[in-house]
């Protein structure tokens, strides 16, 4: 475990601040690990650990024994390998979802990365590199990356094409696991069981965060949680069993008194009905706070949920704080954008998107503080 505590700088007091609770992250990992046991629980840290910071997240997870990680791109794998090499040079498997792009073979070998092979050309090129570790992905219904049934049959009748691979994992990916009742879940499980039998024996994996909650039949040998590690709800419409990992606040820059009938923000999309008090906040879409949140999301200030009025701009949003007595708020006070009351899932619902997008768009302008309080 790393010592992640960092004090806010003087400049940070004047900007939006993102607080990342590494102890809550570890608590979420342990919950998922217990639920998936005896399957191995890996960690998906692609997209800079879903926007939370790959270095801090990966070192925290390595500190509690995680030795299997997944990333999307080879550049992420190289970065992660360099990070893990600073942690007592602990051995770890790093799988790269995007597979073996032409010309990338030397990077995989040099940095000890494991490609997730998604086609016959990838398999053949990797087999030509000597006996190297690999994963093979089977398409069981996502129709995205992976070998289709016809290709798997080709490998079944010509197994020598796989003899020069050190096959570490056979995997697939659920399309609808966040909806436990969706019929495609069972269809994919049945296809996965049948198709993997046509290949050499190797550990199997199909479950993402939501798949872990489908029960032991979906766990196989390795599970690969992502969003649930970072506090997102793995199952739509169900109570969230995960701890919130992030909180986000931003300061009030100005409080304005606006007469009835006045418009606010770009496009004059909002007009006041009565005399209003408007708080202008240092936050915008350049910080990853989506433009679509304008006039849809509500935020917490002085214990009261207040609406966003007008459009979200690049650096600013406006809140109608008329309901809060003037003495209770002032310039410099901080608005809670994300906390235990307003979660990433709440904000996603308001914007008609998903919690993954909320996390991965978190901007680099935030003052970041890593703490250890949520365990």
Image (spheres, rainbow, N blue to C red):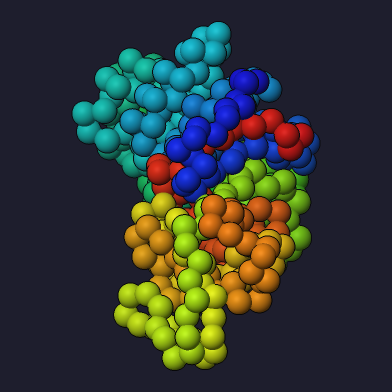
Q: In this view, does 133 lie to the left or right of 341?
A: left
Name the image quarter holding the C terminus. Answer: top right
Count of number-bearing discs: 0
| Quarter of the rendering containing residue 349 | bottom right
Q: Position of residue 282 (x, y in %)?
A: 45, 56
Q: Can residue 286 be seen in this view?
A: yes
Name the image quarter holding the N terminus. Answer: top right
Q: Where is residue 361 in the image (x, y as percent from the top left)?
A: 43, 51
Residue depicted at x 54% and y 13%? 87
Residue depicted at x 48% and y 71%? 256
Q: Is residue 183 visible?
A: no
Q: Position of residue 104 (x, y in %)?
A: 26, 28
Nearer-the-camera pick, 328 or 144: 328
Q: Extreme top residue here? A: 88
Q: Extreme left residue here? A: 103
Q: Where is residue 49 in the image (x, y as percent from the top left)?
A: 50, 38
Q: Extreme front residue here? A: 327
Residue depicted at x 51% and y 72%? 278
């Amino acid at each position: 475990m790393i010592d992640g505590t960092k004090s806010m700088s003087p400049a940070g007091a004047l900007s939006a601040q993102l607080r990342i609770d590494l102890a809550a992250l570890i608590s979420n990992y342990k919950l998922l690990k217990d639920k998936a046991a005896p399957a191995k629980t890996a960690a998906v840290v692609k997209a800079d650990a879903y926007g939370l910071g790959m270095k801090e997240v990966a070192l925290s997870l390595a500190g509690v024994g995680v030795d299997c990680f997944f990333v999307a791109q080879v550049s992420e794998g190289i970065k992660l390998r360099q990070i893990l090499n600073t942690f007592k040079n602990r051995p770890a498997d790093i799988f790269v979802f995007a597979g073996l792009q032409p010309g990338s073979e030397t990077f995989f070998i040099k940095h000890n990365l494991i490609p997730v092979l998604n086609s016959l050309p990838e398999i053949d090129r990797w087999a030509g590199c000597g006996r190297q570790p690999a994963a093979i992905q089977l398409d069981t219904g996502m129709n995205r990356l992976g070998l289709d049934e016809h290709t798997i049959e080709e490998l079944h009748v010509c197994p020598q094409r796989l003899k020069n691979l050190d096959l570490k994992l056979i995997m697939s990916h659920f399309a609808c696991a966040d909806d436990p009742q969706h019929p495609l879940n069972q269809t994919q499980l049945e296809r996965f069981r049948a198709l993997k039998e046509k290949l050499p024996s190797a550990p199997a994996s199909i479950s993402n965060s939501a798949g872990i909650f489908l029960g032991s039949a979906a766990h196989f040998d390795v599970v690969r949680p992502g969003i649930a590690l970072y506090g997102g709800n793995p199952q739509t419409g169900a109570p969230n069993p995960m701890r919130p990992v992030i909180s986000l606040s931003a300061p009030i820059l100005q409080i304005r008194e606006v007469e009835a009938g006045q418009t606010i923000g770009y496009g004059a999309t909002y007009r006041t009905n009565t005399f209003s008090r408007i708080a202008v906040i240092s936050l915008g879409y350049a910080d990853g706070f989506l433009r679509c949140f304008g006039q849809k999301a509500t935020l917490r200030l002085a214990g009261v949920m207040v609406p966003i009025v007008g459009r979200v701009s690049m650096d600013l949003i406006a809140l109608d704080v008329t309901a809060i007595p003037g003495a209770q708020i002032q310039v410099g006070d901080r608005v809670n954008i994300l906390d235990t009351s307003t979660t990433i899932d709440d904000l996603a619902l308001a914007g008609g998107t998903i919690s993954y997008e909320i996390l991965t768009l978190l901007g680099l302008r935030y003052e970041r503080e890593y703490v250890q309080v949520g365990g």
